[in-house]
Image (cartoon, rainbow, N blue to C red):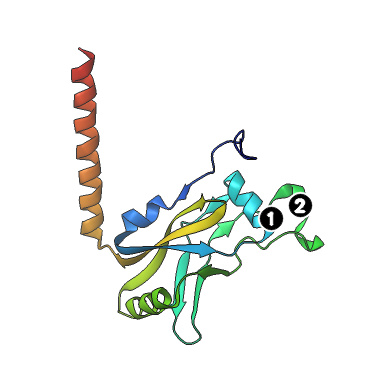
Amino acid sequence: MGKRDDKAPEPTIENRRARFEYTIGETFEVGIALRGTEVKSVRAGFVSLAEGYVRASANPLELTLHSANIGEYAPAGPLGNGRQHAPTRVRPLLAHKKEILKLAKESDVKGMTIVPLKLYFKNGFAKLLIGVAKGKAKHDKRDSIKDREAKRDMDRAMTRKSHR
């Protein structure tokens, strides 16, 4: 029996808005460097990825997460005591050199951006699923809504049919 067997399952924070706002191309799983209080906040689920975006640069070689909100962890005390983290600080992401160079090249194309899709834990380490994305036009969003409503209607019809 492991130390964490009796604990609740780790949270998975998804950025559902990103899949609506963007057409997602290639995805990458990268590590995220978090401070102690940030890890506790993520485990508690106090995270919002909706406003976040990722920057990749070839010179200097770095991959960073901007504007993602990881809420303060209240038991650590107030922000000014040196133990608390800033909720929207720039967080370094961890990836292989080749992946960072590829992401930097792809994000330089006009209209392309890198968005965070999902934050989760894997073998005790925080991981972030990021995707290279292209913004959807208004008519594409309408198509997404139409498809979602059609699927919902079909699911309702199937449940009614199975209850009879």
- Horizontally, residue 121 falls left or right of residue 118, namely right
Pick out the residue farthest to the bottom: 59
Examine the rendered structure and indicate whether residue 123 appears above or below residue 135: above
The residue wearing badge 2 is 76
- Per the model, the C-alpha gap separating discs 1 and 2 is 7 Å
Q: Position of residue 26 (x, y in %)?
A: 31, 65
Q: Residue at x 21, y 32 (%)?
A: 153
Mark 2 element type: helix
- Horizontally, residue 35 falls left or right of residue 77, namely left
Q: Residue at x 69, y 55 (%)?
A: 37
- Quarter holding the N terminus is top right
Q: Position of residue 89 (x, y in %)?
A: 61, 67
Q: Position of residue 112 (x, y in %)?
A: 32, 72
Please tell me the numbered disc located at residue 147.
Answer: none
Q: Position of residue 125 (x, y in %)?
A: 56, 55
- Quarter holding the C terminus is top left
- Horizontally, residue 74 falls left or right of residue 33, namely right
Q: Residue at x 21, y 18 (%)?
A: 162
Mark 1 element type: helix
Q: Residue at x 65, y 40 (%)?
A: 3
Please tell me the numbered disc located at residue 37.
Answer: 1
Disc 1, disc 2: CB below 8 Å? Answer: yes
| Amino acid on which disc 2 is placed | Ala
Examine the rendered structure and indicate whether residue 112 appears above or below residue 57: above
How many residues crowd mark 1 within 10 Å: few (<14), some (14–19), many (20+)?
A: many
How many residues crowd mark 2 within 10 Å: few (<14), some (14–19), many (20+)?
A: some
**Sequence-earlier tag: 1 or 2:** 1
| Amino acid on which disc 1 is placed | Thr
Residue closest to the eye, 6 or 41: 6
Pick out the residue farthest to the top: 164
